[in-house]
Image (cartoon, grey):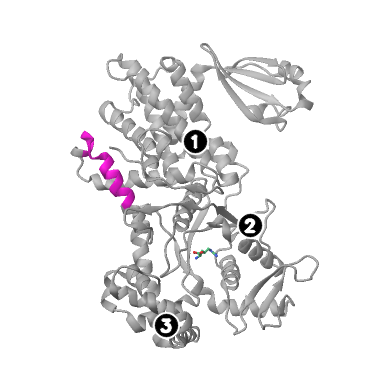
């Protein structure tokens, strides 16, 4: 209404809109920047009142719009009824937003290395970004870029040839690969590998075997490639199981290995473009300094001619652009890789691949902070599965007292979903760039701003609707929802599109988390004060309609965050 009918002041509005309530009115208050302040009175005289805005008056630097409550109730609920899971995303706010192909690259664990909390963060943050972009109408391609190449495969291959067991590889692949390649402590058998790893540093024979295996891989030698393929396939299958539990899927499982060959072509291209310099040590580098004095550079080629992490990333980016012709690509990793991506984008640009659109955003790195202290009962987290098992186990114990749990057929399933939502909300509450300390007890609390509380609110609404209906049949009288609690909820719902808009601007999930928390708190008090049971039929109907609307938006928002809303808890 503001921007369509009153071009006079559109664009000059302070980004903040305030809502205020009194017993009889609901106002929207617009604050203006100082230069416009003087004209506020003049502007307010030119604005017409209508059926939406019942009164307009000016104050010091602000204009108040008194909105008709009746209409507010009617419009919001009508829209909710019609749009359902599209509520908010059809807003005019998104008209100007380009809808195109978005590649989101996330999770990207390393085969046969520990899955750490950072990979879990990347998984859930990337999933959120992909869900958000998708809900706003973009064509999203979800890519998992596995760490499936590099010298560590030499050690893994050599380790497996020496100590591996096909049987164990089939039964418990991640564990077994981890055992043959890395530091382990428990069984006597594993101790051998600890020694092997230690020895690999000093013992020429093992070091030699590792280098030899990797050489064979790089040369595409049949046996080595076969074994490597097997490692990779089994690992991907195993990960897919765990991603399924998390409600995450990928369109593409790519990896560093895919771009191994292309990486050499990239080096040649850099050479042709005069961007490659050879150092005294024989490595190939790209000078990134503005003065051309090598005060900052990136190594793209080892002295033995093999490629590096960044070389493969260059090849991958170029390949994806050709393959998907994306409009934007988003990489989600911890912030320690900030410089890596900065250099990656810089080299791409130097090579003539534009990697920035007008918003500076064709390629974008979304960095996040570290999580400290994510441990399970068994100790340090080694695999993603451990975290999910722990969340489910703890949640199941917390739930075991409740009557509803006792009636559930699959309480583990609910415990799993609620446990995961606790992990997600804890992670999404603050700015992504911040580090945080992980605390199982705190994240699993039913009260306070936790994922458990969101799930609890959703389940309560579902059971109310299940028992009494969603209030959508029969006549609806908006004047029965003019009380303060209902109005606060409806006004809050009205802000949902703004929150999505804000989220898509900075890709931070905290806006949506805060919105859903406030919605849940408002709902908790409405639940107490606006009973359905025992109210006159028409009042009960109107309230049910309100609660059902809340339930829809809550579920929509939770799904974007990557949370599966539960109906019972
Ligand atoms: N596998 C890497 C790691 O665990 C993350 C990959 C990030 N993506 C990329 N295109 N470099 O650190």
Q: Residue farthest to the right?
A: 291
What is the C-alpha distance between the residues marked 3 and 1?
Answer: 49 Å
Q: Dot 3, how many residues are within 10 Å of its Cα: few (below 14), some (14-19), or many (20+)?
A: some
Q: Residue 173 in the image: state x and y as whole percent.
A: 32, 70
| Depicted 408 relative to depicted 231: above or below | above
Q: Residue 177 in the image: state x and y as whole percent.
A: 36, 72
Left/right placement of residue 483 relative to residue 467 reads right
Q: Is residue 317 visible?
A: yes
Residue closest to the eye, 299 or 561: 299
The span shown in magenta is 390-405
| Depicted 55 relative to depicted 101: above or below | above
Q: Secondary structure at mark 3?
A: helix
Viewer-side label of 2, 1:
1
Q: Residue farthest to the top?
A: 24
**Residue 242 marker:** none
Q: Is residue 526 magenta?
A: no
Q: Secondary structure at mark 1?
A: helix
Q: Dot 1, how many residues are within 10 Å of its Cα: few (below 14), some (14-19), or many (20+)?
A: some
Say which quadrant the C terminus sits in. Answer: top left
User: What residue is at 54 percent from the left and 52 percent from the top?
Assistant: 368
Mark positioned earlier in the residue sequence (3 or 2): 3
**Residue 225 marker:** 3
Which quarter of the figure has residue 346? bottom right
Residue closest to the eye, 366 or 196: 196
Q: Secondary structure at mark 2?
A: loop
What is the C-alpha distance between the residues marked 2 and 1?
Answer: 28 Å
Q: Which residue is mark 2?
A: 362
Viewer-side label of 3, 2:
3
């Amino acid at each position: 209404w503001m921007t369509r009918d009153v071009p006079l002041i559109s664009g000059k509005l302070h980004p903040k809109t305030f809502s205020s309530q009194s017993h009889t009115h609901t106002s929207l208050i617009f604050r203006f920047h100082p230069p416009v302040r003087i004209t506020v009175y003049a502007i307010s005289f030119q604005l017409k009142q209508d059926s939406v805005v019942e009164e307009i008056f000016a104050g010091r630097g602000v204009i108040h719009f008194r909105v008709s409550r009746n209409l507010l109730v009617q419009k919001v609920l009508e829209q909710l009824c019609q749009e359902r899971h599209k509520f908010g995303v059809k807003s005019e706010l998104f008209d100007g937003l380009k809808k195109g192909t978005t590649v989101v690259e996330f999770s990207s664990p390393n085969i046969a290395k520990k899955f750490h909390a950072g990979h879990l963060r990347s998984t859930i943050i990337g999933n959120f970004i992909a869900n958000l972009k998708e809900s706003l109408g973009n064509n999203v391609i979800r890519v998992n870029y596995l760490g499936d190449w590099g010298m560590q495969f030499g050690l893994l291959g050599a380790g497996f040839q020496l100590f591996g067991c096909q049987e164990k590889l089939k039964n418990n692949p991640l564990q077994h690969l981890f055992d043959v390649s890395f530091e382990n402590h428990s069984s006597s058998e594993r101790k051998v590998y600890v020694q092997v790893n230690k020895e690999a540093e000093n013992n020429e024979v093992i070091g030699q075997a590792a280098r030899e295996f990797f050489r064979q891989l790089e040369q595409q030698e049949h046996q080595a490639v076969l074994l490597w393929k097997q490692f990779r396939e089994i690992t991907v299958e195993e990960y897919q199981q765990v991603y399924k539990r998390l409600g995450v899927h990928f369109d593409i499982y790519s990896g560093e290995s895919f771009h191994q060959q292309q990486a050499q072509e990239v080096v040649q291209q850099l050479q042709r473009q005069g961007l490659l310099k050879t150092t005294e040590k024989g490595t190939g580098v790209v000078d990134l300094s503005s003065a051309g004095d090598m005060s900052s550079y990136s190594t793209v080629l080892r002295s033995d001619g093999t490629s590096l992490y960044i070389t493969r990333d260059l090849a991958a980016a170029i390949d994806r652009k050709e393959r998907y012709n994306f409009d934007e690509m988003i990489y989600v990793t911890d912030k320690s890789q900030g410089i890596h991506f900065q250099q990656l984008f810089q080299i791409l640009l130097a090579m003539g691949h534009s990697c920035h659109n007008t918003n500076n955003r064709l390629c974008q790195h979304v960095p996040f902070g570290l999580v400290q202290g994510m441990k399970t009962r068994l100790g340090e987290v080694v695999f993603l599965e451990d975290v999910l098992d722990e969340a489910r186990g703890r949640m199941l114990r917390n739930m075991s007292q409740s009557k509803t749990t006792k009636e559930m057929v699959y309480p583990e399933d609910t415990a799993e979903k609620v446990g995961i939502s606790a992990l997600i909300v804890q992670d999404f509450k603050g700015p992504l760039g911040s580090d945080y300390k992980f605390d199982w007890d705190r994240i699993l609390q039913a009260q306070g701003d936790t994922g458990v509380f969101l799930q609890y609110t959703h389940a309560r609404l579902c059971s109310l609707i299940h028992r009494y209906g969603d209030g959508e049949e029969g006549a609806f009288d908006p004047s029965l929802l003019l009380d303060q609690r209902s109005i606060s909820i409806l006004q809050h719902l009205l802000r949902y599109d703004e929150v999505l808009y804000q989220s898509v601007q900075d890709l931070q999930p905290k806006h949506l988390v805060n919105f859903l928390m406030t919605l849940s708190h408002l709902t908790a008090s409405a639940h107490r004060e606006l009973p359905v049971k025992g109210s006159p039929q028409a009042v009960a109907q109107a309230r049910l309609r309100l609660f059902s609307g809340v339930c829809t938006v809550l579920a929509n928002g939770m799904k974007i965050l990557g949370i599966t809303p539960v109906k019972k808890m």
